[in-house]
Image (tube, rainbow, N blue to C red):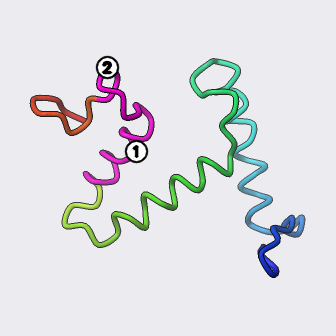
Amino acid sequence: MFVTGVVQNPPHHSCGKRIEAAGNPLLQRAIRDKAVAPHVTLHDLLTLAVGIALATEHHEDPDTQAGRLFHLAVEGLSPARGTVGAPGRSA
């Protein structure tokens, strides 16, 4: 919740708390299994998901574009690792 630019904790019964309660254990397991970098937060992942959803909602093929952007975010911009959208490469 935002009040004059300050982030406040949502009430204990809010949707945000439920998302945190469900998502944090999954994220911690992924970090433990080295599938996710240790500095990644649940807030980072939710922000990324919302950003991709907003960026693709009016795209002519939103599912494909969302998948491409997600893979780009996961793989990064490095030519050694990033293959999404490269000629001859599939997502």
Q: Picture coordinates of residue 45 (x, y %)? A: 59, 47
Residue type of the residue flagged with mark 2: Ala
Q: Establish if 29 lies above or below 62.
A: above
Where in the figure is residue 82, as x and y percent of width and height?
32, 29
x 52%, y 61%: residue: 50
Between 23 and 66, the residue placed more toward the observer is 66
- Report the residue at 69% width, 33% height from top: 39
Q: Identify the element where label 2 is drawn.
A: loop
Q: Are marks 1 and 2 in contact (CB under 8 Å)?
A: no
Give the residues drawn in magenta, as a range: 64-82
Please state which amino acid type lies under the numbered disc 1: Phe
Q: In the rendering, at what x and y percent does residue 76 appear? A: 41, 33
- Secondary element at tag 1: helix
**Disc 2 target residue:** 80
Q: Is residue 66 shown above or below 24?
A: below
Residue 26 occupies quadrant? top right
Query: On the rendered image, what quadrant is the N terminus found in?
Result: bottom right
Q: Which residue is mark 1?
A: 70
- The image quarter containing residue 18 is bottom right
Give the alpha-carbon distance from disc 1 to disc 2, as whole Å: 17 Å
